[in-house]
Image (spheres, rainbow, N blue to C red):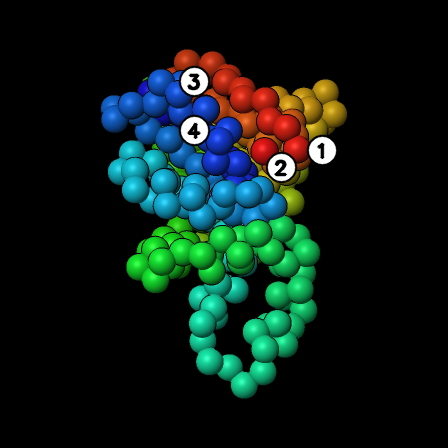
Amino acid sequence: MTYVLSDLHGCYEAYRTMLEKIHFGPDDRLYVLGDMVDRGPDGMKLLLDLMGRPNVTVLRGNHDHTAWLMLRHVGMRVDSSFAEQMGEMCRLWMSDGGDVTWRGYKKLKREEKARVLHFLQSLPVYDEITVGNQRYFLAHTGPDPQKIQQLEDCTLMDFLLGEIDYNQPYFPDRYFVSGHTPTGLIDPAYTGRIYRKNGHIAVDCGAVFGEALGCLCLDTGEEFYVKTGKNG
Ligand SMILES: [Mn+2]
């Protein structure tokens, strides 16, 4: 079976509970649509687990991207302090959940740090898959529906911080599966559950905000949920 979820944000316990719930095995595949780190407590544990699984495909989210930009400077000799070097970007990241990622990273062994950085650097921003006879376009988020038709003109930032128009279908023959925006913000009627409408499937159910971790089986359409408390 093929499963998709997103925006784990350090919610390691909810992630492990979900794997048990879907009976995730070696013949299954899981797609994780980015934002594994920041805000929640166990981003590093999550990354180390995910990167060790050959049947998990991880895409890049804006938090993963910023974490990589920041963490690769840890331990570098700089003239002034790290925060001064990175200035406003670092302050914004720290206040947007990066502080816990920073502390977790500093506790890793040297070899683990190298693996984490390499993993974050390697993450693609989108993927296209076929399950059964149905095609899917997967990304953390994306640009407007006109721009996405010219994929080669899209930028990295379109897929990290773009604002999807959930009222418009993006492709005639594919569902756009995304994370990034908690489903309750797309439509309050979908708070804490997977949004499936207008050619879109949005799977960020707000795990780190105390709603739920949602997971969709693309073969059967079955939805799975793990309720979370505050901080996942
Ligand atoms: Mn995001």
Q: Amino acid at mark 1?
A: Leu
Query: Residue at 43% across / 29% down in the picture?
Result: 16
Q: N-terminal of the two: label 3 or label 1?
A: 3
The residue under label 1 is: 185
The residue under label 4 is: 16
Query: Residue at 47% across / 14% down in the picture?
Result: 222
126 over 112 or under it: above or below: above
Regarding mark 1 in the picture, which secondary structure is present there? helix
Q: CA distance from mark 2 to mark 4?
A: 15 Å
Query: Is residue 78 among what the camera can see?
Result: yes
Label for residue 21?
3
104 over 130 or under it: above or below: below
CB-based contact (under 8 Å), mark 2 and mark 1:
no
Q: CA distance from mark 3 to mark 4?
A: 9 Å
Q: N-terminal of the two: label 3 or label 4?
A: 4
Q: CA distance from mark 4 to mark 1?
A: 26 Å
Nearest to viewer (mark 3 / mark 2): 2
